[in-house]
Amino acid sequence: MRVIVEPDRDEVGRRAAQFVAELVRRRPTCVLGLATGGTVLGTYAELIRMHREEGLDFSRVVSFNLDEYVGLGPTHPQSYRHFMQQNFFDHINIDVRNTHVPDGRALDFEAHCEQYEKHIREEGGIDLQILGIGGDGHIAFNEPGSSLGSRTRLKTLTEETVRDNARFFDNEDEVPRLAITMGVGTILESRRCLLIACGESKAKAIRETIEGPVTAQITASALQLHREVVAILDEEAARLLERREYYRQVEHAQTLMRSGQMRPLSPTR
Ligand code: F6R
């Protein structure tokens, strides 16, 4: 896993947006996997700025969101569809027909989840999956104990997640207890993952994810099995990482290589 530590939340947002923008420029028809929540707001704000000021073109981009609360329709102010419209889609030139968020009011959830997976496959799979992380180490709504091979399905939220997310609702009782979520297996199939974390409250989960054993108790740790994950963290979220100095050296070497000041060793003949 490549680990990048930035000084603060704003820099994390800018850095993550650069990864997304680079892909969108190189492959205008790319498929993005998107997340909701506080962490990704800075990334979306920077992408909106790039669209407005630099003409970053989303017109042919396709997107799939990770999850949605069960019971909330698209216009409910706390639904993830609403979040995406308000914080991202309404401010860029993406074609709304190319944006996909699970339907929290599907009549047949099993069929809907299967269809969601099929749709991702039909679009050629996810090129870049953006991920936040829960304080309990979840990615999407794959709570501790979720199978590391899981697919899109219904999931019961833990009390910790309900408490964390209550800040967006009037009170804790209003937070839905069920969500539709892509599975860990679904996420691991994306070609590249961008794991973003900010703040002290994520430090323990980040340490366990990056330096702990792979375990279904910290579903983000399954990312260690993925061949291309970039973790972008602020200082606070990176605070408990033991190998921080090494990650810094790796980034420094990468910068030197990109600028031509250092060359990779040529293969022995
Ligand atoms: C949301 C999602 C969640 C969040 C995680 C962190 O679509 O998939 O896994 O990324 O709960 O949320 P914040 O960023 O609000 O701390």
Image (cartoon, grey):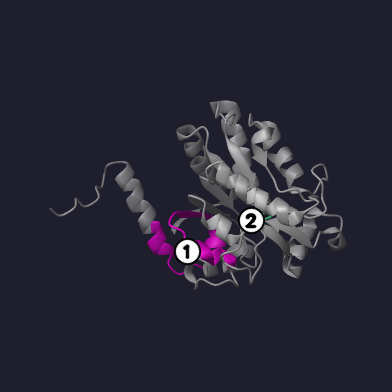
How many other residues sit within 10 Å of disc 1, few (<14), some (14-19) or many (≥20)? Answer: some
Q: Nearer the viewer, residue 66 or 232?
A: 66
Q: Secondary structure at mark 1?
A: helix
How many other residues sit within 10 Å of disc 2, few (<14), some (14-19) or many (≥20)? Answer: many
Residue at the (68%, 36%) spot, across then down: 89
What are the residue bounds of the magenta stretch? Answer: 219-248
* Mark 2, residue position: 182
Q: Secondary structure at mark 2?
A: loop
Where residue 175 appears, as percent x and y from the top left, is 82, 59
Is the residue under label 2 in contact with that under label 1 (CB below 8 Å)? no
Name the residue furthest left.
Answer: 269
Residue at the (67%, 60%) spot, across then down: 141
Where residue 121 appears, as percent x and y from the top left, is 56, 46
Where residue 244 appears, as percent x and y from the top left, is 44, 63
Q: Please give left or right for residue 264 compared with residue 242 in the image.
A: left
Can you tell me whether the CB of the residue at mark 2 lies under 8 Å from the nearest atom of ligand 1? no
Q: Earlier in the sequence, mark 1 or mark 2?
A: 2
Amino acid under label 2? Answer: Met
229 drawn magenta: yes
* Mark 1, residue position: 224
Q: Nearer the viewer, residue 221 or 4?
A: 221
Q: Which mark is residue 265?
A: none
